[in-house]
Image (tube, rainbow, N blue to C red):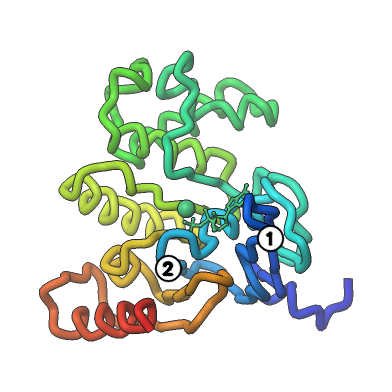
């Protein structure tokens, strides 16, 4: 690969992605010419209304679905199928019900053939990192929604991925738990120095978390604008400057 290849500079490079589905009433342009980059260590949120193609984009970046045209690169490597270099967290918990918390977190490491002692140490560390000490032997059905999503985050981090990719991960939990998980995710991001790409329809969540917010619109699904959020963390909805960013992103979505 040439040294001046621009895809080597960014942790993630999404290059002119379009996706067309065949819907019941003809073709649906779920994504049209979506391009952006995410730098190493950045926390980027993608925000937009329901149906603007966020989940489609998430699935294409994760290598779970193919684009009609365009390419995705992770650290300069073309993504064409799921890779352990990317940890993904879905909106629904997607845990293995027959595995314990530690069994869920260990899944990817088992597949990679990580030696047991190392695996156990890593799993214990991750369970502590997401605040689930004491629940290693519990099964998903014994956990609250917020705890299940903590397990999903730990599992996504297990293989020490270059990117943490999340699709509305806190969409199914109550407001109080959501706020707690947002704070915990920021702590994990700061501690692990991971690159995070986080999809949400919630403007407040995006402004609270992101270094940069990519605002999407629908029909066709596309990126309207990028908003840099230059505010110290932790951020509070009640801060005047927070409100200004919030209104700006909301205005873009409504326009
Ligand atoms: P979001 O996650 O932002 O709500 P989606 O990516 O789920 O948006 O959907 C974007 C558009 O693509 C919607 O119009 C949706 O109905 C359509 N769509 C998504 N998946 C499919 C599919 N498998 N077949 C046909 N249309 C789809
Ligand atoms: Mg979605």
Disc nearest the viewer among 2 and 1: 1
Does residue 187 appear left or right of residue 112 in this picture? Answer: left
Q: Position of residue 240 (x, y in %)?
A: 14, 84
The crowding category of the residue bearing disc 1, from other C-alpha atoms within 10 Å (few below 14, some 14 to 19, many at least 20), is: few
Residue farthest along the left direction in this orientation: 238
Label 2: which residue? 48
Q: Residue at x 61, y 30 (%)?
A: 109
Q: Residue at x 22, y 85 (%)?
A: 244
Say which quadrant the N terminus sits in.
bottom right
- In the image, 25 versus 83, the foreground residue is 25
- The vertical placement of 212 against 178, above or below, is below
Does residue 212 appear left or right of residue 11 in this picture? Answer: left
Residue 46 in sight in this render: yes
Q: Residue at x 44, y 23 (%)?
A: 102
Q: Is mark 1 within 8 Å of ligand 1?
A: no
Does residue 239 appear left or right of residue 92 in this picture? Answer: left
Label 1: which residue? 27
Q: Are marks 2 and 1 in contact (CB under 8 Å)?
A: no
Q: Is mark 2 within 8 Å of ligand 1?
A: yes
Q: Residue at x 35, y 32 (%)?
A: 148
């Amino acid at each position: 690969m040439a040294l001046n290849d621009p895809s080597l500079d960014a942790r993630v490079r999404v290059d002119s992605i379009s996706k067309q589905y065949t819907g019941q009433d003809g073709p649906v342009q779920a994504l049209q010419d979506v391009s952006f980059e995410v730098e190493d260590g950045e926390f980027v949120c993608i925000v937009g209304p329901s149906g603007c193609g966020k989940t489609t984009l998430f699935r294409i970046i994760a290598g779970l679905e193919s684009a009609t045209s365009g390419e995705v690169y992770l650290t300069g490597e073309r993504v064409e199928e799921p890779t352990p270099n990317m940890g993904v967290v879905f909106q629904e918990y997607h845990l293995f019900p027959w595995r314990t918390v530690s069994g869920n977190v260990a899944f990817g490491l088992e597949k990679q053939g990580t030696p047991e002692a190392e695996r156990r140490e890593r799993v214990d560390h991750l369970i502590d990192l997401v605040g689930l000490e004491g629940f290693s032997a519990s099964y998903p059905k014994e956990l609250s929604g917020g705890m299940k999503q903590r397990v999903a985050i730990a599992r996504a981090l297990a293989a020490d991925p270059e990117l943490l990719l999340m699709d509305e991960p806190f969409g199914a939990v109550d407001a109080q738990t959501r706020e707690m998980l947002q704070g915990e995710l920021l702590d994990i991001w700061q501690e692990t120095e991971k690159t995070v790409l986080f999809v949400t329809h919630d403007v407040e969540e995006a402004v609270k978390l992101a270094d940069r917010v990519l605002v999407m619109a629908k029909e066709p699904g596309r990126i309207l604008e990028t908003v840099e959020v230059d505010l110290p963390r932790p951020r509070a909805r009640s801060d005047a400057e927070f409100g200004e960013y919030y209104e700006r992103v909301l205005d873009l979505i409504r326009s």
